[in-house]
Amino acid sequence: MNSSSTAIGIIGAGRMGRHHLNAITSYGARVVAVHDVNPEAAQNLGTDAKSKVVTDSLDEFFDTELDGVVITTPPPIRLTPVKMACERNLAILVEKPPAYDVSEGRKCLECIENSESIAAVGFQLRYQPLYEQLKNLIASETIHLVRTVCTINYYLDFQMPTWFLQSEISGGPLAEQAIHVLDCARYVLGDPKPVQAHALAIKNMALERDEFDAENAIQMTYEMDNGVFGTHMNHCGTEGFCFDVEVVGPHLRLQATLAENAIRGYLHGEKIDEPAVSQNSIGLDKTGAWIRAIETGDESLIRSTFSDAFHTLSLIDAAIHSRHTGRFIKVEEL
């Protein structure tokens, strides 16, 4: 199969749908169908994609001849499109989070495991050269602690879709923001599974905006099954964006900072100050890796399968359930 003949459909015509349209066409594949419950949004994206099918009907969408489906809907709307894609054994790329919560995630995973679908989740940090570089640096090292930080300015300028700060739809900042960098921590550590998590969270900004209930300040602690303890700091009312990952062990302390695109610290007594290399080892982003896997059948190109992403979802869901309880939530309880 040549990339020019690879036919992709997009469900969800918002800004992530547009992002994927650009990535798909840059790769050389075609977007032949667009779906959105808002017909105008579907039409706008479909026109730009020159898609044959533009619709607000999932039945009509899935009647199209497709090789794969990108799902960029809000998190509560995952199961139906995943199920319909799996019934047709279509490849799936789901934006993060893979599902709204563990319960919905299990249902999606069951559909995927009962099908022949290639299923990926859009954790793009796994394809960032910076974090691959960090992963390689610590591959043979002992790590005891990992610390991640995510900051963004939502509660300062409100330049985001409204639902991002509505927990009933987005799941809140842990699911909408923190999940990227927490998944990245799992990636650089070799994909350990979460054991338990706890989070403190508060909304103490924009108190007059009662349409928003998402917390702006979160501090999270967790344990992985490889014995690593992690902390995560999240703030979505801060000037300046950051995704930071720091690892600490007996002979190292290294911090990868996306804003500076560099790794700094020390390793076995040697100072480390390395800019990130220009591209990762496969030369593909998350969308390109997924399309190449469709074309070649080589699923090893996908660095975030749905089954692995489910463990990141479990970590997030445990932390969300722990808020205001004063206790750690074990993943096995979910």
Image (spheres, rainbow, N blue to C red):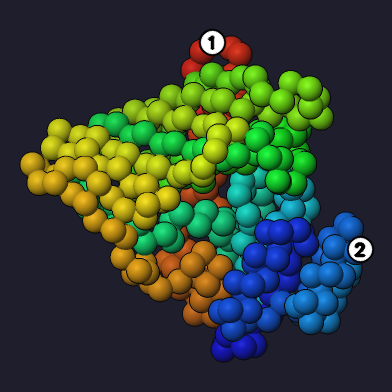
Residue at image coords 53%, 10%: 326
In this picture, residue 24 sits left or right of residue 258: right
* Label 2 vs label 1, nearer the camera: 2
Residue at image coords 61%, 28%: 216
Rendered position, 320 above or below 27:
above
Rendered position, 204 above or below 271:
above
User: Residue farthest to the left?
Assistant: 269
In this picture, residue 183 sits left or right of residue 21: left
Residue 125 at what x, y percent from top left? 46, 54
Rendered position, 89 above or below 198:
below
Q: What separation in Å lies between label 2 and label 1 (alpha carbons)?
A: 45 Å
Circle 1: residue type:
Gly
Quarter placement of the N terminus: bottom right
Q: Is residue 91 visible?
A: yes
Which structural element holds mark 2? helix
Label 1 near label 2: C-beta < 8 Å? Answer: no
**Which sits in the foreground, 49 or 107?**
49
Q: Which mark is residue 326?
A: 1
Residue 86 at what x, y percent from top left? 69, 62
Q: Which residue is mark 2?
A: 39
Residue at image coords 40%, 42%: 244
**Which sits in the foreground, 248 or 152?**
152
Residue 48 at what x, y percent from top left? 78, 77
Q: Quadrant of residue 154?
A: top right
**Which sits in the foreground, 6 or 28?**
28
Quarter placement of the C terminus: top right
Residue at image coords 56%, 25%: 217
In this picture, residue 147 sits left or right of residue 4: left
Circle 2: residue type:
Pro
